[in-house]
Image (tube, rainbow, N blue to C red):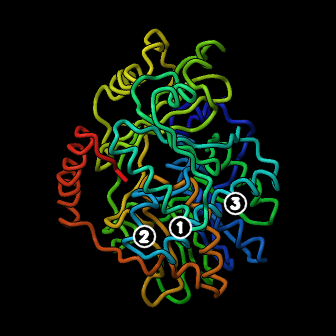
């Protein structure tokens, strides 16, 4: 079943149930209006509804239409630059908090799936793959910082033999295994969370793009056909917010990422390619990421581009990348190809806060590790809305600068910076 309002993806073709939601019309009132029905908005709304708040969730398209329903489906424990880089930057105490937060985020996913009986093909385990000795050393440092934070369950193994225990590829020199991570069908997770919110009494309106917000202590949210008067507002549109709030948009750059998915593979081929049913990514700056779907298709992603553009022949480029990693798939047909945008910040940490002189909270800019961080951020936003912001403040204290170059030049500026890291990839350095 393909819903034509979603991008044509493997996920849209394998939705597990119908979910029809109305468009906002007329005037409405609630305690909290949440804008954006991706993982941040859904998690926030669920946590608020559990606290007894009357919640209205507005979505400009469909639940999970953006990055939450298009991503690689990997619940990774970490942030863009990894935990290993954070001790020097934030100190051990805050690094421990940030790691515990993202571990909690993954547990929230598991709890939602269990509590609300969400069918989304959850599988435990995530593995990183080193393409150089320097990346293996970075993995070792990551493991050491995790241990100093009180977590000693990261496993690192060197050599092609260790690689071959996990994947059928000769491209790597070692492995990094985190049992806390997972992979899943993200669009079915998002839609399952939407149904959970409905059961809790929350209202969801699709095809209700927000066109204006009164950013005051008594905010109002306007769509083309309706208005919501709320005590508080939470903005969670991330890369798809546009210029609705210019001071938020200035701190983001949209980045496009793309995925191809093969035809169904035979059991023999599938078990040769993916030998442990984990989510995988390498440790390059422009990385490859992949996993096996429930129906034995290899889902392979990568080829990121700043500014949210979609270059020509990106599916062909991804297929070529896939074959470099797995030559045994040279004759496999590609059945699906799609892309979408996520948002990065200058700090590569989530940008969270409260708009000045208003009751408008926000969270955005997960910089490529959003499946887990969005879910914990939803809980922290709910806590902040309820008046307990101590945990939320741990993220709000991270300095967030506008992207260099202003609105017109920030994408070229970030692209120039990325060339340095692409050179590091070629030299075998690590993104961590």
Whole-percent x and y of residue 296?
63, 22
Does the rendering let one see residue 337? no
Does the rendering let one see residue 3? yes
Name the residue: 33% across, 68% down: 251
Question: Is 216 placed left or right of 11 in the picture?
Answer: left
Label 2: which residue? 87
Q: Residues within 10 Å of mark 1 (few under 14, many from 20)?
A: some
Q: Residues within 10 Å of mark 2 (few under 14, many from 20)?
A: some
In the image, residue 73 above or below residue 263: below
Residue 148, numbered label: 1
Question: Upstream in the sequence, badge 1 or badge 2?
Answer: 2
In the image, residue 357 above or below residue 96: below
Asked if the residues shown at circle 3 and circle 1 are in contact, with their CB atoms under 8 angstroms apart, the answer is no
Name the residue: 24% across, 43% down: 422
Label 3: which residue? 108
Image mark count: 3
Distance (Cα) linking label 3 and label 1: 24 Å
Name the residue: 61% across, 79% down: 229
Distance (Cα) linking label 2 and label 3: 25 Å
Secondary structure at badge 2 equals helix
Whole-percent x and y of residue 316?
35, 22
Whole-percent x and y of residue 4?
57, 34
């Amino acid at each position: 079943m393909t819903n034509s309002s979603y991008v044509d993806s493997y996920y849209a073709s394998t939705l597990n149930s119908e979910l029809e939601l109305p468009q906002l019309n007329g005037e409405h009132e609630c305690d909290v209006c949440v804008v954006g029905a991706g993982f941040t908005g859904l998690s926030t709304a669920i946590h608020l509804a559990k606290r007894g708040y009357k919640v209205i969730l507005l979505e400009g398209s469909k639940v999970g239409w953006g990055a939450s329903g298009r991503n690689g489906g990997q619940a990774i424990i970490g942030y863009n630059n990894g935990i290993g880089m954070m001790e020097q930057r934030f100190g051990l105490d805050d690094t421990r908090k940030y790691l515990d937060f993202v571990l909690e985020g993954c547990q929230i996913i598991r709890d939602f799936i269990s509590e609300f009986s969400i069918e989304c093909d959850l599988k435990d385990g995530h593995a990183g793959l080193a393409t150089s000795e320097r990346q293996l050393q970075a993995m070792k440092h990551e493991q050491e910082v995790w241990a100093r934070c009180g977590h000693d369950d990261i496993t690192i193994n060197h050599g092609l033999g260790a690689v071959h225990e996990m994947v059928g590829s000769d491209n790597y020199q070692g492995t990094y295994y985190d049992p806390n991570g997972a992979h899943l069908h993200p669009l079915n997770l998002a839609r399952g969370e939407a149904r959970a919110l409905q059961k809790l009494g929350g209202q969801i309106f699709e095809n209700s793009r927000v066109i204006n917000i009164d950013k005051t202590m008594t905010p109002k949210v306007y769509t083309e056909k309706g208005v919501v008067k709320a005590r508080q507002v939470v903005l969670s549109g991330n890369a798809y917010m546009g210029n609705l709030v210019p001071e938020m948009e200035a701190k983001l750059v949209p980045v496009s990422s793309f995925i191809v998915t093969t035809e169904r593979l035979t059991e023999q081929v599938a078990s040769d390619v993916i030998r442990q049913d984990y989510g995988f990514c390498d440790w390059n700056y422009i990385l490859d990421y992949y996993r096996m779907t429930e129906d034995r298709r290899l889902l392979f992603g990568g080829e990121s581009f700043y500014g949210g553009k979609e270059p020509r022949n990106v599916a062909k480029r991804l297929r070529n990348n896939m074959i470099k990693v797995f030559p045994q798939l040279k004759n496999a047909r590609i059945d699906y190809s799609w892309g979408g945008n996520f948002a990065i910040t200058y700090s590569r940490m989530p940008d969270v806060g409260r708009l000045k002189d208003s009751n408008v909270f926000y969270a955005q800019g997960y910089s490529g590790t959003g499946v887990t961080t969005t879910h914990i951020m939803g809980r922290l936003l709910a806590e902040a809305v309820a008046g307990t912001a101590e945990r939320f403040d741990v993220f709000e204290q991270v300095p967030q600068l506008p992207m260099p170059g202003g609105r017109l030049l920030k994408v070229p500026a970030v692209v120039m910076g990325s060339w340095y890291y692409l050179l590091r990839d070629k030299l075998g350095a690590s993104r961590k």
